[in-house]
Amino acid sequence: MSSKWPLVRLGDHVHSCLGKMLDAKKNKGTPQPYLGNSNVRWGEFDLVDLAEMRFEEAEEERYSLRPGDLVVCEGGEPGRCAIWSGHPGMKIQKALHRIRSKETLDNHYLYYWFRQVAKTGYLDAHFTGTTIKHLTGRAVGALEVPLPPVAIQRTMVDALRSLDDRIALLRENNVTLEAIAQALFKSWFVDFDPVRAKQQGLPPAGMDEATVALFPEGFEESALGPVPTGWSVRPAGDAVECVGGATPDTKDSSYWSPEAHAWTTPKDLSGLPAPVLLNTERRLSPKGLAKIGSGLLPVGSLLMSSRAPIGYLAIAQIPVAINQGYIAMPPGRLLPPLYMLFWCQLNMEGIKARANGSTFMEISKKAFRPIPVVVPSAPVIEAFLAIASSLFTRLVANEQQAQTLATLRDTLLPRLISGQLRLPEAEASVAQA
């Protein structure tokens, strides 16, 4: 990487160590939670599935994190990293490097440097292993890092973190918006709260009179147990259209060039911060699109990955063709895609229970279509969409803005680190954004 800043050996500017080896027979001491490779995401941590390992008192400091430490993956996706901001004392296993910078280097600057070089391929030459790649402690120490004065490093970090903070806030808002819509769905269509309130002679909470009037006052028996009077239970295949896709021959370039139409695989949905598909990694030519029977699905189609793994969900915000790893539900039938999005989220365990396969588990359209689903009256569905669609529209706008800011960050990042962009210019771009 060309740079106006001097290149220095990383090991001369940090204190680094690998975490503790997992060995149930040898490890002694008190069981304590620890971070593993799978807990690290770029810039953040997933602390849901922490395991425990024994650590002796003498090992406490060596394998413990302090707020501000950089945690770097040794394997899996070598170089993936995040800044620890949790409580002091969290432990790490051997799959992770703990890096503490000396006075000449800012850990947040180093995080952004790793983020940049992970995209350029610079780290590849430092990996060991063929089938499984590793970034050893020796390799970490040998990395060459551009070293601006630490004051300039921190000014760079301030500009980049202001973008990341805005992105995080937008996505936190989206978590709230999605939770509100899902809670409404569950109240109306799973718990039947408005019907139960009317049955007891009580006014449904938070609902105007016109909406209250749309709900019946009692229940009738169905294949799924009691459902509101006048509503029905039908196979999913009767309530929504279910379509699959295909992959044109990847060796035939005429199917892929010119790149005219978005084409998605479940990989596009992996790690999405919101159930919204705004873009795809690959695109088809018109000739390639002609090889897919379901064609180009319209905006608003619900996409559900049907294998490897089952259960990724997103509503397409672009016309898109799909591969064979999806069950897609375009709009236009009894139950709209937004209704089915929340229905699938709440019924995913039941959907997965109908999957089968030897190499990998898959839910086929044939297995999905018979699943019973409650079909409310059309006026109730319309009332739900009036609220949920407004929430979802805001969610989509937030995610579009977050992706715009992420693109700006990723554009500024290499130019800042290389010294090719002056800080005032970067700060002006951030302020304009």
Image: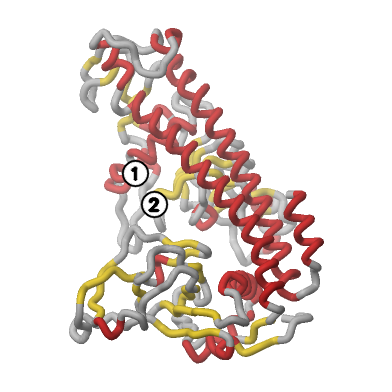
Label 1: few (<14), some (14–19) or many (≥20) C-alpha neighbours in 10 Å: some
The answer to whether residue 356 is seen in the rendering is yes
Work out whether mark 1 precedes mark 2 in sequence or the reverse, and give the earlier one.
2
**Hey, which quadrant is residue 230 in on the image?**
top left
Task: Decide if residue 307 is on the left or right side of residue 26.
Answer: right
Using the image as rendered, state which of residue 251 and residue 237 is in the foreground: 237
- Rendered location of residue 392, percent (x, y): 54, 34
- Please give the label number shown on residue 310: 2
Q: Is residue 293 left or right of residue 416?
A: left
Q: Whole-Å distance between the Cαs marked 1 and 2?
A: 9 Å
> Which residue occupies the foreground of this view, 1 or 324?
1
Q: Is mark 2 on a helix, strand or loop?
A: strand
Residue 395 % position (x, y): 56, 38
Q: Is 282 left or right of 273, judged from the image as shown?
A: right
Q: In this view, does 139 lie above or below 352?
A: below
Classify residue 59 as left or right of residue 132.
left
Q: Nearer the viewer, residue 124 or 291?
A: 124
The label shown at residue 348 is 1
In this view, the residue in front, 294 or 414, is: 414
Name the spot of residue 387 as percent of width and height, x first: 50, 24
Q: Are marks 1 and 2 in contact (CB under 8 Å)?
A: yes
Image point (36%, 18%), residue name: 205
Amino acid type at circle 2 is Ile
Q: Which residue is drawn at 28% across and 15% down?
A: 197
**Disc 1 secondary structure class:** helix
